[in-house]
């Protein structure tokens, strides 16, 4: 079978060997040995279920011994080299500093990324877990992963370095409860310890997910490194056929005889005599035929170095019945001291049919030469068969606009068409200085023998590097040979800590760009409605701002409507008195007998309850809303640039406006509970270590309670972590405030998109902003969106008594008094008593 993407998207990590248990010895103390039971978690990985260790002087006599032991249990690229407290503030350097019953974080460097221990303690599903191999077996059955193993599947397992020793097994739920259980099952099957798995091309298979998505074969190893060999799986998996290869149907009577055929080939490869043309890498070749393709076949020998300058190396290989040969792929593993290779030509002899093929190459396969590719495809000229052209596809990869959407991991892609596939290719050389940044479109060139009509890609990353999660928007591939464009829509995370936890996506093509754009627009509209629908709850009081006119929609006593009102105009307030889905009735707050209505295509005021007053709210990607007649779809509320009512036929399109920014009255009243959304599905969130990030989920952990200090000045207290306030202090923005003047923010409202910005009162000119990775920091105001927050009301607050605002000193005294009462051990009942600012129920809206 061909090299499949699932075997190529693998983590390459060095796993330290588990430390040996120190031998018992007599201790020179008289106190009894007291064991400490301690939990260790992985830095920055909430999916890691934790390691429980019993610590006593007999089990670990030195701190280094503990680190070595944890290195075999906590999967980190360079082993466990640092242990710190859960928030990462203090490093542990001695065994005596570890406390019984506590939890700690493991990392391979000084920088520690805190995790949510509550989430980590909930044991993740096996396919989401990054837990290393241990000696415990999970006895109970585990649920199947969505989109993973739905039916038993056959897998060939080779012994590392010995392709002749192999076992065919069936993957079922019993043996795939977890990666740990699967390795122990293979230990029994192979009758030797199995601690690591590799793909047949030498890339590591790090998880159960990678096994299930593999090409049908793995190499089982102990602690030794991968040993190349001719791991040909065709004869064991026939008559399976790769997706994307010819759909030709063969006579049923010949299927049995053809499946037993095997092809013997002689391969001769000539390395160029250019300086440094030879290579230290392992060379492989894949043959593509009309029936199917071979597995990657490694060309190696035992009689000295291969593929040196000016040498010709000859091999005899055996593959299954691949049918008429139409292309080959040759490549190497880019390993060793001198991996670059310049190939002069390749000769192939079909020993069964007596046919010979000569392929002139004259190309570098090197990261530092030509286009940087380490594999090449070449068409094969077969008499009576058309020769396929070599095509350079344009691959455009769009990273999403969400905060922290970019990745530093290595990204791979495999493209499938009706004439085969490209195999796994790394996307690493684009026109951009840095690849896969938030909101960026990266363009790559991918050379391959023409694939015909494209229908699928598999795209993934290797999960390496900090912040390796990635939000992929879509991939567009342009075929210059046919001038066709294929769109592969994704709009999902490839992140072990987000969505479904997968870092591999299989996407299918839409060759109609209009349909693809429509699909993308519809998805974004649904997301926007989910984020904005709270505004249209029954009882809310709204204002509709028109960007073109720069004014608010008003309904006058004479039933006329315009869009030139001021923000304080009493006729510009509307109550939501009816809501069913996205259909609402907007009644004038001042004139209770009138509501907005669409009559014969024009907006006016009419008695509430009529069919003409029912409006359908259509959310737009820019967070604006269209108001459409529920009775007559297509009729919209439209104004011209002068704020007068009109319709689409009465003026030029540029002079019309039908989008409205919707404001809710009373959002930031005292004691209100709000989300400060940073995108359609993210919000400002307080982290366990006190830092703030804009990539929090729209959940209780991201709720903030508003403390109104005075007009347009507020404080924001975390609901989940009481008495921790958002602040800007000493050049940092975090949630470790205590309610003093560092926590006071002036609210700056943006009329054009209904967002707010938070300016520090103590440090004027500094706003709460976000870096591209979502981390909060003080910034100077810009229009790039990093200082924009979209408040969503979870619980409405109330006005202060008699409409008067408290002074800053009064609010600070109230907070400090509440803090002192809660910290006094002699009055425990004070801890549960609600403060005056939180004891009241919420109002649906502020009535003017």
Image: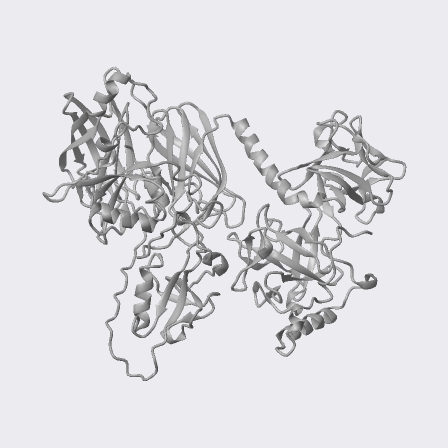
User: Most extreme residue toward the top, as rendered?
Assistant: 384
Whether residue 8 is situated above or below residue 485 in the rendered picture: below
Q: Residue at x 53, y 57 (%)?
A: 775
Q: Quadrant of the N terminus?
A: top left
* 286 sits to left or right of 456: left
Nearer-the-camera pick, 385 or 644:
385
* 284 sits to left or right of 697: left
Q: Quadrant of residue 66?
A: bottom left
Residue 468: x %, y % from top left: 43, 50
Residue 467: x %, y % from top left: 45, 53
Q: Is residue 156 visible?
A: yes
Q: Residue at x 23, y 24 (%)?
A: 259
Q: Is residue 339 visible?
A: no
User: Most extreme residue toward the front, as rendered?
Assistant: 140
* 471 sits to left or right of 305: right
Q: Quadrant of residue 339?
A: top left
Residue 734: x %, y % from top left: 57, 63
Q: Residue at x 35, y 70 (%)?
A: 55
Residue 410: x %, y % from top left: 38, 46
User: Most extreme residue toward the left, as rendered?
Assistant: 303
* 445 sits to left or right of 255: right
């Amino acid at each position: 079978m061909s090299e499949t993407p699932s075997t190529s998207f693998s983590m390459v990590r060095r796993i330290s060997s588990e430390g040996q248990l120190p031998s018992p010895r007599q201790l020179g103390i008289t106190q009894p040995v007291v064991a400490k039971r301690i939990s260790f978690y992985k830095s920055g990985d909430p999916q890691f279920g934790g390691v429980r260790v019993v610590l006593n002087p007999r089990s670990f006599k030195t701190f280094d011994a503990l680190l070595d032991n944890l290195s075999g249990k906590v999967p980190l690229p360079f082993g466990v080299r640092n242990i710190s407290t859960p928030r990462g503030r203090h490093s542990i350097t001695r065994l005596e500093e570890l406390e019984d019953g506590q939890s700690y974080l493991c990392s391979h460097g000084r920088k520690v990324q805190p995790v949510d221990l509550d989430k980590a303690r909930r044991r993740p599903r096996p396919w989401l877990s990054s837990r290393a191999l241990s000696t415990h077996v999970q006895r109970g059955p585990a649920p199947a992963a969505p989109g993973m193993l739905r039916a038993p599947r056959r897998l060939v397992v080779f012994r590392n370095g010995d392709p002749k020793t192999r076992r065919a097994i069936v993957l079922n739920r019993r043996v795939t409860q977890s990666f740990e259980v699967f390795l122990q099952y293979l230990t029994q099957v192979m009758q030797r310890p199995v601690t690591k798995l590799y793909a047949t091309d030498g890339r590591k298979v790090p998880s159960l997910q990678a096994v299930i998505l593999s090409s049908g074969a793995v190499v089982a190893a102990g602690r030794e490194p991968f040993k190349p060999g001719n791991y040909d799986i065709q004869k064991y998996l026939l008559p399976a056929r790769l997706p994307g290869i010819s759909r030709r149907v063969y006579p049923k009577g010949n299927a049995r005889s053809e499946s037993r055929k095997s092809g013997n080939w002689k391969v001769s490869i000539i390395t160029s005599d250019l300086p440094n043309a030879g290579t230290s890498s392992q060379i492989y070749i894949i043959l593509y035929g009309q029936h199917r393709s071979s597995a990657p076949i490694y060309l190696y020998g035992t009689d000295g170095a291969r593929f040196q300058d000016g040498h010709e190396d000859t091999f005899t290989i055996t593959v299954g019945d691949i049918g008429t040969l139409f292309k080959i792929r040759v490549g190497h593993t880019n390993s060793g001291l001198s991996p670059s290779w310049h190939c002069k030509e390749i000769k192939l002899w079909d020993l069964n049919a007596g046919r010979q093929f000569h392929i002139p190459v004259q190309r570098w396969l090197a990261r530092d030469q030509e286009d940087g590719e380490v594999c090449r495809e070449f068409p094969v000229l077969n008499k009576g068969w058309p020769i396929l052209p070599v095509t350079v596809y344009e691959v455009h990869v769009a990273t999403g606009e969400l905060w922290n959407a970019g990745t530093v991991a290595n990204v791979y892609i495999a493209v499938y068409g009706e004439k085969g596939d490209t195999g796994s290719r790394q996307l690493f050389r684009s026109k951009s200085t840095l690849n896969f940044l938030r909101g960026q479109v990266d363009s790559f060139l991918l050379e391959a023998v023409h694939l015909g009509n494209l229908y699928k890609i598999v795209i993934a990353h290797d999960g390496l590097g900090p912040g390796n999660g990635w939000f992929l928007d879509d991939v567009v591939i342009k075929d210059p040979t046919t001038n066709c464009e294929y769109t592969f829509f994704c709009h999902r995370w490839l992140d072990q800590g987000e969505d479904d936890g997968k870092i591999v996506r299989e996407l299918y093509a839409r060759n109609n760009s209009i349909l693809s754009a429509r699909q993308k627009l519809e998805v974004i509209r649904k997301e926007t409605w989910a984020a904005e629908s709270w505004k249209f709850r029954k009882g809310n009081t709204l204002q509709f701002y028109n960007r073109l006119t720069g004014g608010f929609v008003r309904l006058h006593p004479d039933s006329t409507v315009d869009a030139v009102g001021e923000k304080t105009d009493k006729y510009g307030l509307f109550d939501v008195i009816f809501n069913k889905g996205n259909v609402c009735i907007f009644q004038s707050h001042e004139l209770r007998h009138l509501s907005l209505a669409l009559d014969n295509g024009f907006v006016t005021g009419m008695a509430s309850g009529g069919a003409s007053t029912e409006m359908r709210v259509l959310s737009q990607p820019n967070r604006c809303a269209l108001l459409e007649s529920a009775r007559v779809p297509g009729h919209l509320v439209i104004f011209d640039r002068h704020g007068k009512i009109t319709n689409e036929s009465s003026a030029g399109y540029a002079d019309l406006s039908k989008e409205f920014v919707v404001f809710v009255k009373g959002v930031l009243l005292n004691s209100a509970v709000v989300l400060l959304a940073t995108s359609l599905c993210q919000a400002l969130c307080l982290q366990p270590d006190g830092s703030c990030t804009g990539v929090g989920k729209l959940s209780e952990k991201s709720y903030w309670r508003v403390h109104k200090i005075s007009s347009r000045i507020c404080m924001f207290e975390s609901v989940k972590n009481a008495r921790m306030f958002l602040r800007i202090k000493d050049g940092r923005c975090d949630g470790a405030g205590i309610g003093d003047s560092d926590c006071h923010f002036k609210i700056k409202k943006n009329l054009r998109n209904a967002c707010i910005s938070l300016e520090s009162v103590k440090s004027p000119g500094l706003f709460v902003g976000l870096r591209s990775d979502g981390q909060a920091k003080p910034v100077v105001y810009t229009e790039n969106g990093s200082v924009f927050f979209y408040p969503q009301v979870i619980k409405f607050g109330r006005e202060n008594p008699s409409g008067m605002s408290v002074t800053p000193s009064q609010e600070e005294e109230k907070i400090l008094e509440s803090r002192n009462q809660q910290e006094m051990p002699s009055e425990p009942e004070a801890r549960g008593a609600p403060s005056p600012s939180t004891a009241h129920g919420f109002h649906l809206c502020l009535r003017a």
